Every structure is written in structure tokens, then in C-alpha cells.
Image: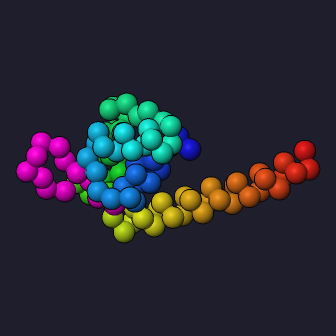
Amino acid sequence: MTDPALLILASLADGDKHGYAMMEDIRRFAGVRLGAGTLYGAITRMEEAGWIRGMESEDRRKPYTLTAAGRRHLEEQMAALDRLLKTTQRRLKHA
């Protein structure tokens, strides 16, 4: 899984994070290094879609949180990936 949006949603499903914390979390759990441009471009699109929301912070780092719509989208995408995985596993048994 290398789609930045899904990786960001999966990271935020574990709690609110600012950009650098998301990049480090994603690197740890997925083995994927997102560049800052990729990360913040995806964050902008995801905020526009209503999947995440920026939070107020006294620090210069802006944390983001997963919205209910973002949680639903992540659940839908994970269900689709689960179907793909199961279908592929069945087909590999016959290959």
C-alpha cells in the first residue's frame, strides 16, 4: 500500500499527528518514506475532501485529526483491499 492518502488516514487512525510525526509513523508501519511535498499535497486534498481536519496549536506544528468521513473512507478502502487480498490468495492456490 503506497497511496499517500490511505497511509495518512491509517496513521491518523492511531491518533492526531502533525506532518513530521505522520511521516515517521508511516515509515515505521508501512516502510514508505513520504516526501514533504507528497505529504502536504495529500493533506491539502484530504482536508478539501473532509477526511481530515487541521487543529489549533500553540506550537508551529499543526496537528491533524481524522474526521468521521475520513474514517468511513478508510474503512471502505480497507474492505476493498481485503477483498482483493482474499481473491488473490484464492487465485494463487491454483497458479
- Front position in the image: 15 or 5: 15
Quadrant of the frame with the C terminus: top right
Q: Is residue 76 rendered to the left or right of residue 93? A: left
> In the picture, residue 12 is in which quadrant?
bottom left
Q: Is residue 71 rendered to the left or right of residue 67? A: right
Q: Residue at x 44, y 33 (%)?
A: 33
- Residue 31 lies, with reference to residue 52, above or below; the image says above
Q: Percent from the top left, x then y, of residue 18?
A: 25, 47
Q: Is residue 53 visible?
A: yes
Q: Residue at x 23, y 51 (%)?
A: 63
Quadrant of the frame with the N terminus: top right
Q: Is residue 52 rendered to the left or right of residue 2? A: left
Q: Is residue 14 found inside the magenta-colored segment of the image?
A: no
Q: Is residue 62 found inside the magenta-colored segment of the image?
A: yes
Q: Is residue 79 rendered to the left or right of residue 24? A: right
- Front position in the image: 45 or 64: 64
Query: Magenta stretch mostly in which secondary structure?
Result: loop
Q: Percent from the top left, x then y, of residue 58?
A: 8, 51
Q: Percent from the top left, x then y, of residue 5?
A: 43, 47
> In the picture, residue 84 is in which quadrant?
bottom right
Judged from this view, the residue extending furthest toward the right is: 94
Q: Percent from the top left, x then y, of residue 86?
A: 74, 58
Q: Is residue 51 visible?
A: no
Q: Residue at x 91, y 50 (%)?
A: 94
- Front position in the image: 67 or 60: 60
Judged from this view, the residue extending furthest toward the front is: 28
Magenta part of the protein: which range?
Answer: 55-66
Q: Residue at x 45, y 67 (%)?
A: 72
